[in-house]
Image (cartoon, coloured by chain):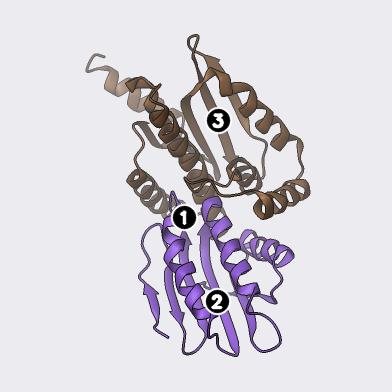
Chain colours: A purple, B brown
């Protein structure tokens, strides 16, 4: 499966999805006015990936901050991944937050509470 | 406005510790410029990362609330040119940031907005968080990409009660002033 990459901008994160390794990475900030436009191609890629997922899919969320419009799209993204988290294939989420940034840690816990995927909330010195 | 008023305006901005002030039409690109300006200022102030992100968050949500609101009114075609413009002010005083916004709203939507603000102000941080989670899970995203979470998020990130005022300007519109403090 083809890799999917988007270079980050002032309002959108860098996206590195790799169908060969099963690593799906978000880096930066996500604050577009309408996040649906930004997330639609990501969901499209995921739809294709779902038909032949890796044994283990790892989501690396390295977000600096995001707006409420994105928060909903991020949830939809996780909800889609729930479908391939089962006996044959698993999904893990690594949610990174910068030292002392309790808001981002809390945001990870919020998703963990409403998404049926295993979350690891990881403190790092610098997010990227 | 006389040319000497420039000095008075300068003094007013200085006295009120205003670090950013904009009045006019809101475009999507404007937010990027605001964040860029603030980023530089906060670097100079030595603002800690956590607070920096809270200010960015509050400014982004406030801005996008206004942006979508104005977009709505434009579609309904009921807005006079002047009522499309809005005001954003950011103040900085002894480590404390204030994000102030002012914009025209339809007089019929005042009560609904007031109810939302009253509700949000009544909740403590744990209750705000619980409400955010429920809404995140259940609120559908509108076609504009809004999730109805803006005010809850602003209240959560600012960690303070939202200060607001509605000023009735004529029979159809009210001017909505919001002051969000990030300590």
Q: Is A81 situated left or right of B4 in this image?
A: right
**Mark 2 Cα-neighbour bin, 10 Å: few <14, some 14–19, many ≥20:** some
Residue B33 location (% of width, % of height): 34, 47
Q: Is residue B150 above or below residue B39?
A: above
Residue A48 location (% of width, % of height): 48, 77
Q: Mark 2 lies on which chain?
A: A
What is the distance, in whole Å, between disc 2 and disc 1 at their CAs? 19 Å
Q: Is A96 situated left or right of A19 in this image?
A: right
Please indicate, yes or no, whether residue B32 appears anywhere in the rendered image. Answer: yes
Nearer-the-camera pick, B80 or B37: B80
Q: In which quarter of the image is residue A86?
A: bottom right
Judged from the image, the secondary structure of the residue bearing numbered disc 3 is: strand
Q: In this view, does A113 lie above or below B170?
A: below
Of circles 2 and 1, which is in front? 1
Q: Which mark is residue A35?
A: 1
**Where is mark 2, residue-wise?**
A60
Nearer-the-camera pick, A6 or B1: A6
Q: In this view, does B155 lie above or below A16?
A: above
């Amino acid at each position: 499966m083809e890799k999917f990459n988007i270079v980050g901008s002032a309002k959108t994160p860098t996206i590195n999805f790799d169908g060969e390794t099963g690593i799906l990475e978000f880096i930066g900030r996500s604050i577009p006015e309408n996040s649906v436009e930004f997330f639609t191609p990501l969901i499209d890629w995921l739809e294709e990936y779902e038909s032949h997922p890796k044994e283990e899919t790892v989501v690396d969320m390295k977000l600096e901050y995001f707006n409420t419009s994105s928060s909903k799209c991020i949830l939809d993204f996780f909800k889609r991944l729930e479908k391939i988290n089962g006996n044959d294939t698993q999904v893990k989420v690594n949610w990174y937050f910068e030292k002392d940034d309790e808001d981002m840690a809390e945001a990870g816990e919020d998703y963990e509470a409403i998404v049926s995927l295993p979350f690891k909330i990881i403190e790092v010195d610098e997010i990227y | 406005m006389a040319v000497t008023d420039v000095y008075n305006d300068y003094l007013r901005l200085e006295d009120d510790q205003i670090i950013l002030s904009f009045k006019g039409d809101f475009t999507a690109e404007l937010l990027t410029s605001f964040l860029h300006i603030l980023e530089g200022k906060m670097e100079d102030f030595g603002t800690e990362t956590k607070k920096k992100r809270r200010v960015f968050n509050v400014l982004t949500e406030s801005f996008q609330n206004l942006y979508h609101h104005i977009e709505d009114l434009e579609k309904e075609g009921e807005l006079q040119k002047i009522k499309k413009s809005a005001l954003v002010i950011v103040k900085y005083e002894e480590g404390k940031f204030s994000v102030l916004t002012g914009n025209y709203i339809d007089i019929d939507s005042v009560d609904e907005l007031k109810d939302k603000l009253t509700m949000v102000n009544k909740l403590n941080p744990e209750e705000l968080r619980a409400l955010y989670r429920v809404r995140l899970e259940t609120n559908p995203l509108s076609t504009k990409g809004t999730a109805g979470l803006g005010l809850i998020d602003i209240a959560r990130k600012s960690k303070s009660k939202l200060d607001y005022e509605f000023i009735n300007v004529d029979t159809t519109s009210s001017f909505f002033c919001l002051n969000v403090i990030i300590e």
